[in-house]
Amino acid sequence: MGAWWSPSRISWWIGVLFAIGATCFTVGALPGFVELVGSRADALVFFVGSIFFTTAAALQCRQAFVGEDALPARRRRLDRWSGAVQLVGTVLFNIDTFRALQTGFSAPGYDRLVWTPDALGSACFLVSGVLAYIAVSRRRDAEWRIASVNLLGCVAFGIAAVASFFVPSRGSVVSLAAANAFTSFGGLCFLVGAILLLPDASSEPSPSPGDGLAAAGP
């Protein structure tokens, strides 16, 4: 397993946890999945995924704020702001997906898109993704590639949030198909970013409190 197996490193765990959460969001929004498993099970998939996102984000935020850090001051500030905003976004997803799990599809004002990223959570992810990208924008290494694909995922989640806006006069959302498609695509981007982090994390000579932030999170 070599480069892919390094459970002694926090950054490796961040990658694994984000990968599991991203898989849940990717699969949960796939066309036909809710018809296959039922609305309650589909809602549970999103809720479980949001918990893994929050756990990974909490570890990542801790890395940015605690421990020795030889990174430049500007990079540390960007990492910390990115991690904090990302953590807030994942908590908002926790609330959103838990409400969906409790309420179900039949409640007034709710439909199958209730557990797609809500506007505030998606906005937090987008801000976090931009900050993480800026932190490594002058480089063209693994961190830059991972930050880039994660930023793409953040944009996709933002589009999904817009597409899932409920229009009272129409009695429906802006676009059900687009919301599901971009949610699934965003989850896939985060999954790729998390997987790319694993060999990078295991090859580092020592843990760095900011190493996973720009590279791992949505």
Image (tube, rainbow, N blue to C red):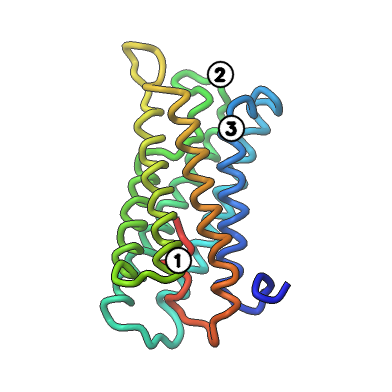
Give the residue pinned by disc 3: 30
Residue 59: % across, % down: 52, 68
Which corner quadrant holds the N terminus? bottom right
Above or below, comparing residue 10 to residue 18 in the picture: below
Question: Mark 2 is on which residue type?
Answer: Ser
Which residue does the image show at 35% across and 11% down from the upper left?
170
Above or below, comparing residue 30 to residue 131 in the picture: above
Cβ atoms at labels 3 and 2 below 8 Å apart: no
Residue 200: % across, % down: 54, 73
Question: Mark 3 is on which residue type?
Answer: Leu
Residue 192: % across, % down: 54, 54
Q: Earlier in the sequence, mark 3 or mark 2?
A: 3
Q: Earlier in the sequence, mark 1 or mark 3?
A: 3
Q: Nearer the viewer, residue 144 or 211?
A: 144
Check disc 3 and report its element: helix, strand or loop. Answer: loop
- The crowd level at tag 2 (other Cα within 10 Å; few <14, some 14-19, many 20+) is few
- The crowd level at tag 1 (other Cα within 10 Å; few <14, some 14-19, many 20+) is many
Label disc, if present, on residue 215 of the rendered structure: 1
Q: Nearer the viewer, residue 140 or 8?
A: 140
Residue 78: % across, % down: 30, 70
Give the residue pinned by disc 2: 106
Check disc 1 and report its element: helix, strand or loop. Answer: helix
Question: Mark 1 is on which residue type?
Answer: Ala
> Which quadrant of the view contains residue 150?
bottom left
Which residue does the image show at 53% across and 25% down from the upper left?
112
Q: Earlier in the sequence, mark 1 or mark 2?
A: 2
Marks 1 and 2: which is nearer the front? 1
